[in-house]
Image (cartoon, rainbow, N blue to C red):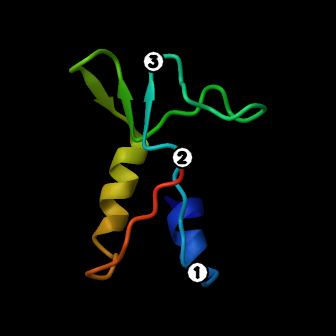
Amino acid sequence: MKNVIIGSMRNWSKVALEWNVANDASFNPNTTGGCTECKGAITINSGEAFTKNVAYYIIGQASKFVPQNSQLLLLF
């Protein structure tokens, strides 16, 4: 929260990037050479079972301060 959300906004950023929104129990997907143990906002354990991680609550907290009609940009 301190570095990703607050730190970005204090430096006049228009974007705060939380990688990634969802991952599986093996921490996939991830980028080659990147973090192989980083959790997303949710971890999908099976077809219908998932776990909320710290990033889930960070996104929820930060969303309270996002102006109305803002646009979400998803990068794949």
Residue 31 is situated, as x and y percent measured from the top left of the image, at 68, 35
Q: Which residue is tagged 3?
A: 25
Camera-near label (3 vs 1) is 3
- Residue 53 left/right relative to 32: left
- From mark 1 to mark 2, how far is it between C-alphas? 26 Å
Q: For the residues carrying marks 3 and 2, which lies nearer the camera in this image? A: 2
Residue 61: give its label: none
Residue at 60% of width from left, 61% of height from top?
3
Is the residue marked by circle 3 packed among few (<14), some (14-19), or many (20+) residues within 10 Å? some
Identify the residue under disc 1.
Answer: 10
Among the 4 quarters of the image, the one containing residue 28: top right
Quarter-of-image position of residue 8: bottom right
Left or right: 53 in relation to 12: left
Name which residue lies at 30% across and 57% down: 60
Instruction: Give amino acid for label 3.
Output: Ala
- Residue linked to disc 2: 76
